[in-house]
Amino acid sequence: MSSKLSFPHSSHTPLLTLIFTLLIFLLSSPLSSSSITPPTRKPFSKIYAFGDSYTDTGNTVSATGPSGFNFVSNLPYGMTYFHHPTNRYSDGRLVIDFLTQTLSLPLLPAYRSTTGGGATNGVNFAVAGSTAIEQGFFVKNNLTFDVTPESLGTQLGWFNNYLAKQGGCSDAVKCGALFNDALIWVGEIGANDYAYAAETEVSKSVIQNLAITRISNFLEAILKKGAKYVVVQGLPPTGCLTLAMYLAPTNDRDDLGCVRSVNTQSNTHNTLLQAKIQDLRKKYPQSNIIYADYYNAYRDIMKNSKKYGFKEAFKVCCGSGGGSYNYEFFSVCGSPSAKPCPNPSQYMNWDGVHLTEAMNKVVSGLLLQGGYSHPSFQDLISKKMSQV
């Protein structure tokens, strides 16, 4: 894999790279007509979620959050399901929302919200723009916009604070009470790390190794606390996002028509992540660790888009400019000139970086019941239910 992403070279390349990095940084996905079948009784009483904007249900937009993300506080974000903005980076629900509804649990409150600290059914610690690598690395290498300082380590710190308020996890009895009935959901994380380093002198291999190490360390910290049921999402094929398509040269394409160099990067990341997960399974045999194959679930949808009800694979639902992508750098979703499409259920891409509720629904169905989790999510449920 090339150590750098390739994008069109012109007098505007530095500006394009800047905008590309900033917007990808926000990454802070119907089984066409079918619905996801909930279990007959609740296997879990709570979920603890981590990740970036694909999982964030409101941690970014807060009194202390960066103002650059405040566009998700306005319509058309949230228009489809909630009919009002909920600080989610979509027109409606995210994969984590479909997960909670499938398990017959309330939608997860954000940790930073007023309800997050005292929630009884779990908490969402994911933050839009979050990285696997600590921000200090990016600051040291002049790679950060200093917009979202939170990393996966920050989320772990929040989790530790939350657990302390719940009585802590200082012994087996307390840990058992906290984790026996809890599902740990680690949403996709790492895409922002690569975006930070795009078109810089820091090699992608350095970013890759550090990101995988940080994710592995995070997982081990959770497992050491006593987590028994853990699901870890891989990266999606980020080269299929509208923004990547818009910026990359047309000769950089794969079999799906997406950006080959970017997808290769994500796929390699996932391969390394799965190897780390396998090591952790051997080290913590008492825990059940599931790998959610976001990458290949997304590929399935791309290859069978009509089957899943999609007509637009690359054009954004909410954007401006028309053309093949309906996307303009300075008129992204949320800006005055950007408008949402009347039928978001036919689109995969919502704003160029994030997905529509319809896409999130299909992805969640494939991960939870469509064979794209290893071992399967149904196996995880069966193991949990056998111990109830």
Image (tube, rainbow, N blue to C red):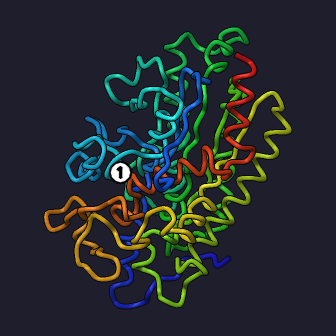
Q: How many marks?
A: 1
**What is the quadrant of the C terminus in the image?**
top right
Residue 236 location (% of width, % of height): 56, 60
**Residue shown at the point (49%, 58%) measured from the top left:** 192
Q: Nearer the viewer, residue 95 or 102?
A: 102
Where residue 220 appears, as percent x and y from the top left, is: 71, 36
261 over 232 or under it: above or below: below
**Above or below — where is 314 with respect to 349?**
below
Q: Residues within 10 Å of mark 1 (few under 14, many from 20)?
A: many
- Whether residue 22 can be seen here: no
Residue at the image point whose x is 66% and y is 52% from the top: 372
Label 1: state its secondary structure: loop
**Residue at (81% x, 39% y) in the render:** 281
On the rendered structure, is 364 left or right of 228? left
Residue 205 locus on image (x, y percent)? 67, 67
Front in this rendered view, residue 33 or 270: 33
Using the image, determine if residue 74 lies above or below residue 383. Answer: below
Classify the position of the N terminus by image quarter. Answer: bottom right
Residue 120, x across and y down, in percent: 46, 17
Farthest left residue in view: 336
Image quadrant assignment for residue 253: bottom right
Residue in the picture at 29% in, 83% down: 323
Q: Which residue is mark 1?
A: 89
Q: Amino acid at mark 1?
A: Tyr
Q: Is residue 41 left or right of residue 196?
A: right
Please tell me which residue lies in front, 365 or 15.
365
